[in-house]
Image: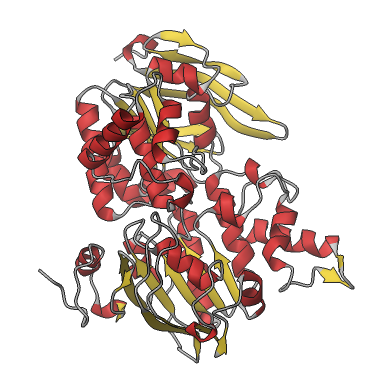
Amino acid sequence: MSNKPSEYRLSTQGLTKHYPGTIACQDIDLTIQPGEIHALLGENGAGKSTLVKMIYGVTAPTRGQIFWEGRPVVLRSPAMARELGIGMVFQDFALFESLRVVENVALALPKREPHRVLAKRIQTVSERYGLPIDPEKPVGSLSVGERQRVEIVRSLLQTPRLLIMDEPTSVLAPQAVERLFETLRQIAAEGCSVLYISHKLHEIRALCDRATVLRQGRVTGTCTPADETAGNLARMMIGQALPVVNRPPSKVADVALAVNTPRISSGDEHEVGLEALSFSVSRGEILGIAGISGNGQGELLRLLSGERLAPSADAIRINGEPVGQYGVAKRRERGMAYIPEDRRGQATVADLPLTDNATLTAINTQPITQYGLMRHAAIQAFTQRCIEIYQVVCSGSQAPARSLSGGNLQKFVVGRELLQMPQLLVCAQPTWGVDVGAAAFIRQKLLDLRSEQTAIVVISEEIEELFEISDRIAVIADGRLSPIRSVADSSYEQVGLWMSGLWDSEGALNA
């Protein structure tokens, strides 16, 4: 077969993007055939997001050429890309929080539709593809997983001829992932091409026809994923074998977090109410909480972090002290650290440099102030430690948070919290959007922190992750928390069924 651009749905030749002091992409040659599901692999900072932003018209290339069905094109905006038939699902969502789902979808469509008609279409498509969303919900009330569904459904409504998906399953439950795969295979069979970015190598091997691998902004090879092992794909991505996570035995000490609350009603119609909660987490253990997005995880996180006060002070205790009526700052003063699920909206301030973002939570735990004044050298040193230890790819400690890729910003947020050596850590989706090597590194750091007698609560939709690091595991479904069991006495299948709310008070499955 020749390599003429006319043979492909999309191809690039020598596509390059330079930023001041950084080469994001260098001489990228990529070909995607009609009806092909093509993987784009690479570790965080390899240039994947920059490449797809050039293809989608978000970023102008420094040089090189894009061909659409054999014709050279210059894509000056996402609107131009959509006119050609290119759709994109972003890893970091391009949604307006103050608008409802139906209004966000309408902004991306070329023609105006009556509100009721569009809302019905959204509901039909979302149900058809197993990605349920309420068209009337404000986006600001949605969890990260629900926002991911909005992005996917919005793209599918445009009937694209090339669909770019950047980490589309990072916050989807296993059942939703399999349904999404069925959808992608179906639209590929109908002739739509898919450019698929994921760090989940088992997904790549199960779904994708071909793969292009990037490392440090350059193409290092192509392959057929089904013919490769996950280990081989990892070596192609990161240049070495995957690190092995070492899980030492747990040494449980005193209770660090105790929760005992009555039923908590939802604040409005778009929130999930929490049923009565009663559980504890000891120092030296990790409690994993699984669940399908939108089942109360966000409400539980706000309750534990102090963003929402508990009904009484005694409802939540940290190291025996009643803190239920304390906000975030006071709970942090009692030894708590928190990794929220929204790294851009909650965990960082986009326009501030990393040094300032480091001080947002470390100001009371690190020696970065003296006599009420900021010690800039100490702030710089703490930020640099975070960058170096967690291998954050950035232009330096003064880089604004918005300049980091999603995976690198996640590594920075995780590093900032873990380096404070908290007594209690509450975290959501700790490895969201990071590459396989970095995910293994973060999981090891969580286990290392556990060995230092920290109590850890991990809320995640990655069942495999929870089984790898947790000592005990539970499920949240429709605001109800299942019985808590040791991981040794649980199974993937059982947890998967529990995610649908199928358990009784003793933890047995309901038919």
- Its colouring scheme is secondary structure
Q: Quadrant of residue 476?
A: bottom left
User: Is residue 301 depicted above or below 127 in this figure?
Assistant: below
**Quadrant of image for the C terminus:** bottom left
Q: Residue at x 43, y 34 (%)?
A: 103
Q: Position of residue 139 (x, y in %)?
A: 45, 45
Residue 208 appears left or right of 356 = left
View extreme (top): residue: 71
Residue 19 at x, y percent in the picture: 68, 31
Q: Residue at x 20, y 73 (%)?
A: 503
Horizontal and vertical percent position of residue 277: 38, 78
Q: Residue furthest left?
A: 511
In depth, the one of 160 and 2 nearer the eye is 160
* 82 vs 469, nearest the viewer: 82
> Which of the two residues, 446 or 164, is positioned nearer the viewer here?
164
- Quadrant of the image for the N terminus? top left
Q: Is residue 93 positioned above or below 186 on the image?
A: below
Residue name at image x 37 percent, y 19 percent: 85
- Residue 467 spot, x, y in % from top left: 33, 69
Query: Can residue 349 be seen by looking at this rendering?
Result: yes
Q: Tell me if I can see residue 195 in this picture.
A: no
Q: Is residue 121 left or right of residue 141?
A: left
Query: Which residue occupies 22% across, 81% down?
Result: 505
Give the left or right position of residue 490, taking residue 396 as reference.
left
Q: Is residue 259 above or below residue 212?
A: below
Q: How many marks?
A: 0
